[in-house]
Amino acid sequence: MASKQKKMTPQQKNYQTLQQKHELKRPVLKNCIKAFLVGGIICMIGQAVSYFYIYYFNFTEQSVGNPTVATMVFFSMLLTGFGVYDHIGQFAGAGSAVPVTGFGNSVISAAIEHRTEGFVLGVGGNMFKLAGSVILFGVFSAFVVALIKTLLVMWGVL
């Protein structure tokens, strides 16, 4: 198989070495630590919200998940609206995008960005551009799992 790298002129080689010399080195370990810590803090806040619902509203450990997720998404949307979550995202990177709060941030960011186009075509039409695939695959996978469970129950396996 032929070499993928084509022959470079001496001027191109000089430019390549100059570019490599001035290229900024990414602090990968530092970024990973920041993402881990911020993601952990977000999860710790989510656990505190779960305990709040269990203690004050008598939810069980099995039923506390839905209100906790809704509350965390609401918090992230609120913080995005005030411009705070953007700073958290710039600092933490994937540590703020991977938890469910990143979903709320992506939904409300698109809504805020397109609010000048109107409520229907701007906010309503663009709000789910980023989050639409998440919702679609979540609903579809829930349907498939429910279908499999229903078939297993009907066949007497479960």
Image (cartoon, rainbow, N blue to C red):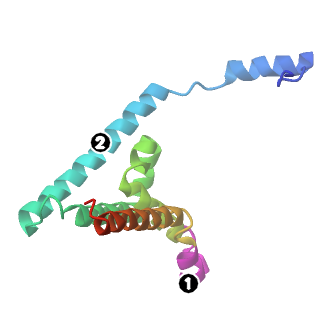
Q: Residues within 10 Å of mark 1 (few under 14, many from 20)?
A: few
**Which residue is painted at 33% across and 68% down in the image?**
150
- Residue 121 falls within the magenta-colored stretch: yes
**Image quadrant in which the C terminus is located:** bottom left
- The Cα atoms of the two marked residues, 1 and 2, are separated by 37 Å
Work out whether residue 142 or residue 80 is closer to the camera in this orientation and state it.
Answer: 142
What is the x, y in percent for residue 9?
92, 19
| Residue 40 placement: quadrant | top left
Residue indicated by mark 1: 120
Question: Residue 40: which disc?
Answer: 2
**Which residue is painted at 7% across and 67% down in the image?**
58
Work out whether residue 145 or residue 6 is closer to the camera in this orientation and state it.
Answer: 145
Q: Does dot 1 land on a helix, a strand or a loop? A: helix
What is the x, y in percent for residue 131?
50, 63
Report the magenta residues as a range. Answer: 113-125
Work out whether residue 87 or residue 133 is closer to the camera in this orientation and state it.
Answer: 133
**Which residue is painted at 71% across and 20% down in the image?**
20
Q: Amino acid at mark 2?
A: Gly
What is the x, y in percent for residue 16?
79, 21
**Residue farthest to the right?**
9
Q: Amino acid at mark 1?
A: Val
| Residue 95 placement: quadrant | top left
Q: Is residue 125 above or below residue 10?
A: below
